[in-house]
Image (cartoon, helix red, strand yellow):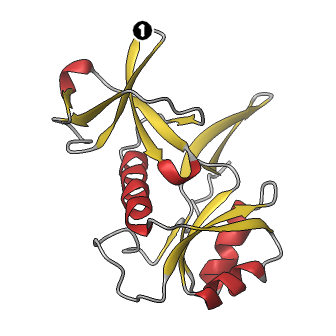
Amino acid sequence: MPVLCGETSIYPDDLLEGESDDDPDSSWWVLYTKSRQEKAVARHLWSRQVAFYLPLVKRTLVYGSRRVVSHMPLFAGYVFMHGTWEARLVSLASNRLSRILEVKDGAQLREDLARIRCLIASNAPLTPESRLVPGKRVRVRRGPLEGLEGTMLRRHGRTRIVVAVNFIQQGASVEIDDYLLELVE
């Protein structure tokens, strides 16, 4: 059985690049969707050329003896949108949203999402983290995740680095060797 390609998870492709917003009327919005409507909201925004990011990760699901590879949202129920007040109204027209939250610190959210995108691009097996606890801030010294900053945690005797989206108090973690990490001061 063929595996379907992943859908567009970011529009435009350079949404998370750069450090400042070009348009002062634009801001970041967190769209909280109705159950299992994240991809439909993303398709709606994409068809209307509204900037968004929906972090998708590959998951292998087993149904009896059949294996199916699917692209699932990393954060269930969340789509991140960047746009004006009119773009917010366009998102509401999808009729698939539960609520919309305006982000006051858009630069921090953009930075968090860029780190999450980097983590997804590494193709390492990710674990969603919904109960974030403070820990030591670390930076990866070498390897494919070099320069990535996050919080170190230990689970089942193994070291993981957690990259958080602070606005929604969720993140993703990946297993990593201790010797690749350095403390951030």
Q: How many marks?
A: 1
Which of 40/154 is in front? 154
Which residue sits furthest front? 104
Q: Position of residue 150 (x, y in %)?
A: 34, 38
Task: Judge left or right: residue 80 versus residue 148.
Answer: right
Q: Position of residue 36 (x, y in %)?
A: 78, 55
The residue under the point 55% across, 87% down is 84
Q: Position of residue 3 (x, y in %)?
A: 62, 52
The relative height of residue 121 versus residue 54 in the rendered view (above or below) is above
> Where does label 1 land, which residue?
157
SS label for mark 1: loop
Amino acid beneath label 1: Gly
Q: Position of residue 82 (x, y in %)?
A: 52, 76
Task: Judge left or right: residue 117 versus residue 40.
Answer: left
The residue under the point 48% across, 84% down is 26
The relative height of residue 11 versus residue 87 in the rendered view (above or below) is above
The relative height of residue 72 versus residue 41 in the rendered view (above or below) is above
Task: Judge left or right: residue 68 versus residue 58.
Answer: right
Q: Can you say which quadrant of the picture contains the C terminus? A: top left
Tell me the quarter of the picture where residue 153 sits.
top left
